[in-house]
Image (cartoon, grey):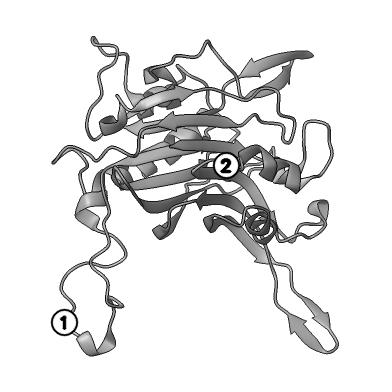
Amino acid sequence: MKLVSYNIQYGFGGDGRYDLARAARVVAGADIIALQEVERHWLRSNEDDQPEILSRLLPEYYWVYGPAFDMDASERRDGRIVNRRRQFGTMLLSKLPIAWSRLHTLPLRRTVRPLNTRNAALECMIRTPAGPVRVLSLHLAHIAAEERLEQIDYLLAEHRRAPSDGGPWSGADDEPVRNWSNGGPEPENPLAAIWMGDFNMEPGSAEYRRIVGSTPYHRRAAYLGGFVDAAAVAREPTADFHTHVTTIDGRPTKRRLDHCFVGGMFADRVRSASADIGEIASDHFPLPVDIDLETPFATGTEGA
């Protein structure tokens, strides 16, 4: 299956032009799409409802939107209030149904300067042919490693608790007349997970090592409950690639800020991971990952 992560910079391309349809064309066809910097009702993007527009541009997908922050954008028309919320966050689209989702608002450090904004991770549980998988579209802080480390620690703690916490509900329904289960079985909350997004960190950084651990004696080692970098374990390795170009001291600098980390049970299933550096629909480049989610897990490895 093809997965793609893309920070779309609210529809503004590397050429400075606003064109949400162009960003949608870049990701169309993937099985699972993780988007960052998607917004609703901002002046800079014509006050568009971008999740709604993207859902119409990509009509064959189930989708969930998770706002990292939410502010009033209501107005009065003809004596009545038109309720609107100005939002900014992440989105996940899938050709397979999204069984459940939840939004993690991540720790934030208040700044004097520069501007710092709330970040979030949108978690969606998808029943793939391989088994149930939690897929996260996330965006980490851009200012400092210390803040990103706090956010990563929060997400790792949530990850480790997933199987014991359970999903949206658990246990036998002792009030069947209220039909809390809506006739369905208890939702899974598996250990199997994939994190995709704009991490604002580079390979080898302290934040990167916090996710994958220090370099092991066996370089392709993978703990069942841990994560590996999809690009590092891909069967078809790609030469060092970048997903963003930043100007530092007046010089363009290539950086890999966008990543896909897969649970240890996927370590031998990643076929390829790269970046489409020719795309200009955003200031980031899309990160496509090909991973085997068709072959069922071996019993006991999925952590469901």
Q: Position of residue 79 (x, y in %)?
A: 83, 89
Q: Residue at x 35, y 38 (%)?
A: 293
Q: Position of residue 284 (x, y in %)?
A: 66, 31
- Say which of 209 and 228 sits in front: 228
Q: Residue at x 53, y 51 (%)?
A: 93
Q: Position of residue 45 (x, y in %)?
A: 79, 52
Q: Residue at x 22, y 32 (%)?
A: 224
- Which amino acid, mark 2? Gly
Q: Is residue 190 visible?
A: yes
Mark 1 vs mark 2: which is more N-terminal? 2
Q: Badge 2, how many Cα within 10 Å: few under 14, some, many 20+?
A: some
On screen, residue 181 versus residue 22, left or right, reads left
Task: Give the tally of numbered discs.
Answer: 2
Give the residue number, with chain letter if any, for mark 1.
Answer: 174
- Which amino acid, mark 1? Asp
- Say which of 218 and 184 sits in front: 184
Q: Residue at x 23, y 27 (%)?
A: 223
